[in-house]
Amino acid sequence: MPAKLIVLTIILMSAVWIGCKQKLNQEMKTSTMNITKEDFGVLPDSTKVCLFTLTNANGGKMKVTNYGGIITSLEMPDRNGQLADIVLGYDRLDGYLRDTPYFGAIVGRYGNRIAKGRFLLDGQQYTLPQNDGENTLHGGIRGFDKVVWDASELRDSASIGLRLHYLSRDGEEGFPGNLEVQVEYRLTNSNELVIHYLAITDRATPVNLTHHSYFNLKGAGNGSVLDHLMQIQASAFTVVNENLIPTGELRDVAGTPMDFNTPARIGERIIQVGSDPKGYDHNYVLSRPGLDQVSARVSDPVTGRIMEVLTDQPGMQFYSGNFLNGSITGKQGKKYEQYYGFCLETQHFPDSPNQPSFPSAILRPGEEYRSTTVYRFRVE
């Protein structure tokens, strides 16, 4: 056989071997991805609740219940490869059925606050349940965090996931229109939690969907997050009154304790924040929202865990766990003290239905509400 032909044959055989090896590696990764389903309890009305456990190809693990779409557990590695559950919550369903601060839940129909539980839309006044003083918080008394969602499994070569569906009927919690909602959770092999939101309506209605996990990169219940380094790419924040309702003013963060454009410890200036109890519970006006931009980055110097947030939403609520006070006993019997978790809730601005200068949060028939948020985890 001529020498050139031999060389060409070797090259072709090598290419085939590399292609087969890549395919085998991909098949092995796919085979290690898994989703299981088990009973999680029964509601007072006898509705059965399920718990799904999703495992990616790298061993990252997430547990989701179809009650409230709650992420009950999210295990991610530290710099030594050790997994820890980094979201606050409960071991059993009954914890979530008590008065719980939205641990890990899907929030809607309208995340955050609506002033005095009312808004005017197309000339008609709508009244909502007041569950936060005189205001409506996170969709009312029975928001999306307290309903049972239909669930189906999702999987592809790069992720394992869950698709959740719920029909919020016209008049539910005072909101107009039948709102059909779909939320997809995907746990990727790159250790990303990707959340896709989709909604359609048959009548004009406010829609503001978000996710409400309390994160602690040390591990749930393993101390405060005040030493976490926080960075939020935001030019301004929405100023609020004593009831945490926006005044309509967008104030520059420069020179204030609200400025996290340069990374700073969460606890570095928390005492200067004018709230009671002291802490952050503010909506940030993101500088460049988009899925090609990191809008927030949080790191824990102890474990080396990093969480990055990418979103197409205009705002992000940063909450530092101010109202946690040790009265809640969470997973593994650990008490959740003040500042034991932080939330980064991607969203439209609070009270947008009553603030004409804010980006509109009104969904109309024939339109689609679409939004994506990515929580990306890595180590340093």
Image (cartoon, rainbow, N blue to C red):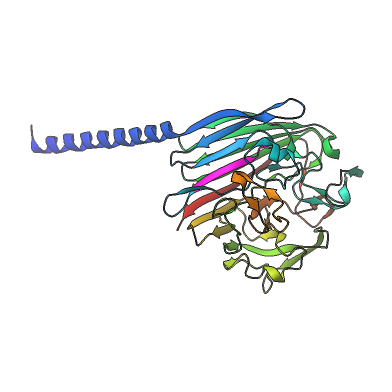
Left or right of 65? Residue 36 is left
Is residue 174 found inside the magenta-colored segment of the image?
A: no
In the image, is residue 69 above or below residue 321? above
Residue at left offset 76%, top offset 46%: 138
Point out the image quarter for the N terminus: top left
Left or right of 69? Residue 168 is right
Q: Quadrant of residue 128?
A: top right
Can the viewer see residue 368? no
Residue 348's x, y, as percent?
A: 72, 51
Residue 171's x, y, as percent?
A: 85, 35
Q: Nearer the viewer, residue 101 or 196?
A: 101
Q: Nearer the viewer, residue 118 or 123?
A: 118
Q: Nearer the viewer, residue 216 or 259?
A: 216
Q: In the orientation shown, which residue stands out farthest toward the bottom? A: 255
Residue at left offset 84%, top offset 47%: 131
Magenta region, residue range: 69-76
Can the viewer see residue 335? yes
Is residue 73 found inside the magenta-colored segment of the image?
A: yes
Residue 243's x, y, as percent?
A: 83, 59
Residue at left offset 76%, top offset 29%: 44
Q: Nearer the viewer, residue 325 or 108?
A: 325
Q: How many marks?
A: 0
Left or right of 306? Residue 150 is right
Point out the image quarter for the C terminus: bottom left
Q: Is most of the magenta stretch helix, strand or loop?
A: strand
Residue 165's x, y, as percent?
A: 67, 31
